[in-house]
Amino acid sequence: MWSHDHQQFIVHQLPALNDNYIYIIQARAHPACIIIDPAEAGPVEQACRQYGLHPTHIINTHHHWDHTGANLALKQMFGCRIIGHASDAERIPGIDIMVSSEEPPVIDGLDIVILDVPGHTIGHMAIVIDDALFCGDTLFGAGCGRLFEGSYAQMWRSLQCLAALPDGTQVYCAHEYTLANLAFAASIDKNNAALQKRIREDECKRRQGRPTIPSTIRLEKQTNPFLRPLADDFCREYAAHHHIEHTPLAVFRDIRQRKDRW
Ligand SMILES: [Zn+2]
């Protein structure tokens, strides 16, 4: 487990399953303690016992089992309440509180903003608390989620919404997929010095057994192939090279389809 200091809270990062991360957000001045996307109960139970944490809420970014699998077990164990997107109320196990960008959850001690980010699933949401972003399977280190339910246009809008957050925002993704994503990124973005630097640094972190997550919005905008269509010069050169329409959406769609086949 790794812990990251923020002004109002601490983020505890727990590896789970093969490559998931579960996050526990511990408010500093209040008893609020939130579990985000509990894939399995064991690591959460162990961390809570070891550090004396008392979870008050679970928030699921979306309905997939590797983000909700331990909802019921943890609810029973800690008596915490489960928060999910209103449009996924039927698919979030044990849901108590339904939220959306217009009706974010109110939890004392944490200023929570919800962003509706459909694409990977229709009811997918991202959670922003001050300078921390919990983006589930929408944005990954140098990647983005597969489009299981939404359209390319929806996912592109969702990614733009995340890219509009302040550059220093810490990006807490739900999976450690970064190195594989970087290998793909290098294959389509050959003259990007920031990308080459990130590959060296993230390979070093993994060799040392450390996570590549969190990253930052700044780093994702510089190196993530699914945010690169935001840069005019990249977009123009990519569209010309691959003989496709010169719009960010067309370039995003082509890169996503290429990654699906990669
Ligand atoms: Zn998912």
Image (cartoon, grey):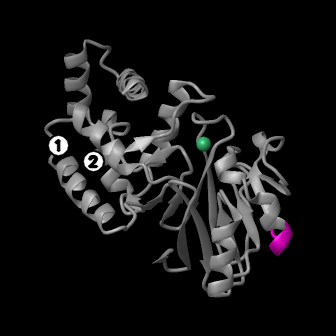
At label 2, the amino acid type is Gln
At label 1, the amino acid type is Asn
- Measure how far apart labels 2 and 1 are at the Cα level: 8 Å
For residue 157, above or below residue 49: above
Q: Which residues are magenta?
A: 76-81
- Residue 177 position, x and y percent, is 42, 49
Contact? badges 2 and 1 (CB < 8 Å) = yes
Residue 53 seen in render: yes
Does the stretch in magenta take in 187?
no
Q: Residue at x 23, y 60 (%)?
A: 201
Count neighbours of disc 1 (C-alpha within 10 A) and say few if under 14, some if 14 to 19, many if 20 or more.
Answer: some
Say which mark, if any, is on residue 158. none
Locate residue 178 relative to residue 51 in the image: left or right.
left
Locate residue 57 relative to residue 183 in the image: left or right.
right
- Looking at marks 2 and 1 on the same chain, the residue that comes earlier in the sequence is marked by 1
**Helix, strand or loop at mark 2:** helix
Q: Residue at x 31, y 69 (%)?
A: 208
Query: Where is mark 2, residue-wise?
Result: 222
Q: Quadrant of ligand 1?
A: top right
Say which mark, if any, is on residue 192. 1
Q: Residue at x 37, y 60 (%)?
A: 212
Can you tell me whether the CB of the residue at mark 1 lies under 8 Å from the nearest atom of ligand 1?
no
Which quadrant is home to the C terminus? top left
